Image: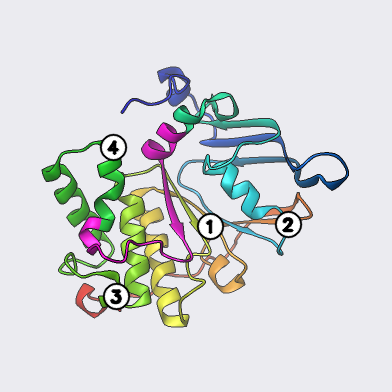
Amino acid sequence: MSAPPELTSAALAADIPLIRLRCVTKVYGVGPVALTALKGIDLDIRAGEFVAIMGPSGSGKSTAMNILGCLDTPTNGQYLFKGAHVEALSRDQRARLRRRYLGFVFQGFNLLARTTAQENVELPLLYRGESTPVRHAAAAKALQSVGLGGWEHHTPAELSGGQQQRVAIARAIVTEPAVLLADEPTGNLDTQRSQEIMDLLTRLNADHSITVLMVTHEPDMAAYARRLVHFVDGHIDSDVPNPHPVTLTPSTPPGEMR
């Protein structure tokens, strides 16, 4: 499926941030009960960055992530993706942008219970209208890349929490997205599985140049990112590089990954 027409070749070639937010506000409701979740934020993200987005509950971080993921639109302000004004796109154009450029990983895995790992990973390609052979090959490759080669025919009930999140990550990257948006990706996992998932996200960022935007409230997980953006009361309170990102642990043989 073609990209939104606003993503022109000139915009794609220009030396501009992959993502740019300018004076973005988001207001829910009207009148005296209106809630301003974002209060004029500015944010630039360049291709290949690994950014942790942090902040207390109600700080605006999840609202910002929803806007960045084209799941919501700003009330005011500009959202540019590769130079295109996303806030001016139609609903269908935003959906096409999501399918082509974005991948999503959620805390709850969101896998279909009665389908295999292979079938779960193929879903984004099914929505794109890809042929069965293309879907099978791409899903197998994605599962292999997250250390789940040989687990294609297992259902979620036959997988550990860490393995289920790996399937979810494989599903997110099967379309070869430019950006991976991860919302509390380790929230349902124990410490060891959390470390495995963070190592995987770090490798995807380093080896495949996938831009990673991760919402987390856990400093131990944010420590893997190379940049830390902290939200407070609808504003960006701080935006600083992480001088000492966590070093990757040695790779685990795929058959041992739980």
Mark 2, secondary structure of its residue: loop
Q: Position of residue 105 (x, y in %)?
A: 44, 57
Q: Is residue 252 visible?
A: no
In the drawing, what numbered circle is on residue 234? none
Cα separation, mark 4 vs mark 1, equals 25 Å
Considering the image in quadrants, where does the N terminus appear?
top left
SS type, badge 3: helix
Give the labeled residue for mark 2: 59
The answer to whether residue 213 is left or right of residue 201 is: right
Amino acid under disc 4: Arg
What residue type is disc 3 on?
Answer: Ala
Mark 1 secondary-structure assignment: strand
Reply yes or no: does residue 118 show up in magenta: yes
* Residue 128, numbered circle: 4
| Above-or-below relation of 65 to 55 | above
Image-quadrant location for residue 26: top right
Please report the residue visible at 44 percent of the width from the left and 75 percent of the height from the top: 195
**Residue under pointer 3:** 157
Marks 2 and 1, how far apart at CA: 15 Å
Neighbor class of circle 2 (other Cα within 10 Å; few <14, some 14-19, many 20+) is many
Give the mark nearer the N terminus: 1 vs 3: 3
Q: Which sits in the foreground, 87 or 48?
A: 87
Extent of the magenta region: 95-119
Q: Amino acid at mark 1?
A: Met
Between marks 4 and 3 in the image, the one whose residue lies nearer the viewer: 3
Mark nearer the viewer, 1 or 3: 3
Residue lying furthest right in this view? 32
* The label number, if any, that marks residue 214 in the structure image: 1
Q: How far separated are the C-alphas under marks 4 and 3?
A: 27 Å
